[in-house]
Image (spheres, helix red, strand yellow):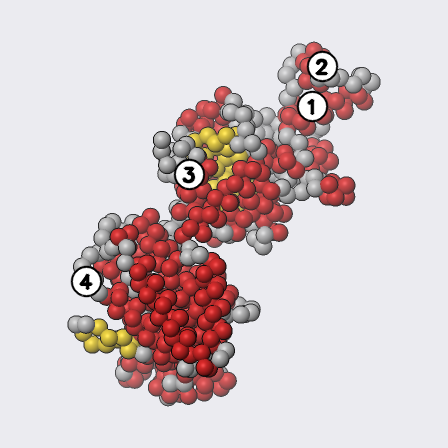
Amino acid sequence: MTLLGNDLLTQLAFSLHENKGVYALLLGSGLSRAASIPTGWEITLDLIRRVALARGVAEQPDWAAWYRAETGEEPNYSVLLAELTSSPAERRAILHSYIEPDDDDRQEGRRVPTAAHRGIAELVRNGYVRVITTTNFDRLIENALRDAGVEPTVIASPDALAGAEPVAHSACYILKLHGDYKDARILNTDEELSAYPDAYNTLLDRIFDEYGLMVCGWSGEWDRALRATFLRAPNRRYPMYWASRSGLAPAAQEVADHRRARIITIADADSFFVGLVQRIETLEQTRRQNPLSVELLVNTAKRYLSRPEHRIQLDDLVTQEAERLRAATEVPALAPHGAVDRESFLSRIHAYESVTEGLARAAGAMGRWGDGSETPIVLDLIRALCADADRIGSGSVHWLGLRRYPAVLVFTAYGLGLTAAKRWGALHTLFTAEIARESSEPKRTVEALFLWAWGDGADKALWNLAWETPQEEGRRKTPLSDYLCALFAEWGKSFIGLTPDFELLYERFELLGGLAFLETAEEPDLERATVDGNRDNWVWFPPGRYGWHSSNFDRLAQEVLSQALARPLLDGGFARGNEHFLQLSLENIKRLAGRMRW
């Protein structure tokens, strides 16, 4: 017996968890069945019933059988709509009555987002799914996403596609293949469903080629154009999972065989998506340090910070946690050997984050609410983590460099706490504190742990793996900076407090790190870089995401030169305490930032 025991739902959850953004959803009418929105077959039978009753026919126990006897044909949704209506607008009006909820529906929980829709919204909000293709006309998935705080890009017509932002730039991209029920251009008839516009075909070909696929609620019987897209897809880069209640019909089975789909038997869409979300949450929790122990550590650090007489206990707490971290990182799985690929890289950084989270968040709390007496404790911790990381000297340079990642996390957390508290002198001390090295001169922390100055562990190509999707491969200008910003937006909730714009706070920390880095530059070199007409000439420093994020950079540049911030920064030790040096350094940073926006 295998470990999974043919548990395809757990297999899918694991694949989603380890490959964020790689899977796209294909949703059909079966998804909305639990919301009391009828399927096409049910609408067909109800339309037959209503038309027949209007003609004086008595109520029938089996309207499908009656229709066959009356017409000699099988009941057909598309044929019936074409017979009853003469325009798309008329068809839209008929569908409206089956989809739009009234007050009674809302009170009874009908025609509103179901557990399945909310489960999908959870997957999108947490970054596991970003692309949704659907044949449904209703707006249940859009409503669920907005309730979850996600504003989707919705494509319901070819002209909407022409003006939409690219798939890669959207938090959630919904392609409504058959239109929207409030738009008269919805597709219903066999003729309308026999072929898609060229723009749709191009987009579908890309999605089906580049993404893994999860199918739920789609019968595969009616949509000839969609089946054709599956059958012409050239590659199977990622798996396809098909959730089905009662097996697949022949047309659907042909698609499944072509894509080598794994069929998951489900009771209904609600239980499928709820179970999938629960399994992913469990996988996330197993990767993380016990959340209760993390919160206990952070809260204990806060309590010790509030009483000066507890500084010894705070030191002991940090020392004990550092020993636990050291033991947790000296394991075979983190040995500096083996291939450097996306899967192994993600596994390592998540492992380091899991065992460092509590200590990093506690350091952030010390930066946010400390009084300066905690700074030696944090600096000793950072130096100890660096010494542990450097004890091993052989192996892959990337894995060896990544051993400093726990020190980077603690350094960044403390720096963000100091930035939030506007403790500029302590922040400058953090940036300029020296870290000893066995075989060479000491380095300042800003030269050893800050962004690209960190070394082989901060290699841009390496950190692009953390973001890589079929659309984004290698395209991020600052992948490490982007990753840390996203990570600390979550971790920082426990020590930053309320902030209207975390990205701005994070980029302020990075910009000040750049200023501190440039303090060892020669003033004449900065002068030449400022006046030289060659735009490629600057004194090097590790740039952050503010370099391409122009709106934030312009605001931060004004801040740094304003009297309200410039004087406190200079008094704290930045730019050697020299206003002219500060101006030169900022001009140098502006020059590189301009280059990053090209």
- Residue highlighted by disc 2: 66
Q: Nearer the viewer, mark 4 or mark 1?
A: 4
Front residue of this view, candidates 386 and 319: 319
Looking at the image, is mark 1 or mark 2 earlier in the sequence? 1
Label 1 is placed on what type of residue?
Leu
**Residue placed at 28% from the left, 52% from the top?**
333
Dot 3 falls on a residue whose secondary structure is helix
Q: Amino acid at mark 3?
A: Gln
The answer to whether the residue labelled 3 contacts the one labelled 2, judged by CB atoms less than 8 Å apart, is no
Please identify the quarter of the rendering in which residue 384 is found: bottom left
Is 394 on the left-hand or right-hand side of 453? left
Q: Position of residue 386 (x, y in %)?
A: 28, 68
Judging by the rendered image, the residue that carries numbered circle 4 is 393
Cα separation between marks 3 and 4: 37 Å
- The local secondary structure at tag 2 comes to helix
**Residue 45: mark in rendering:** 1
Tag 2: amino acid: Trp
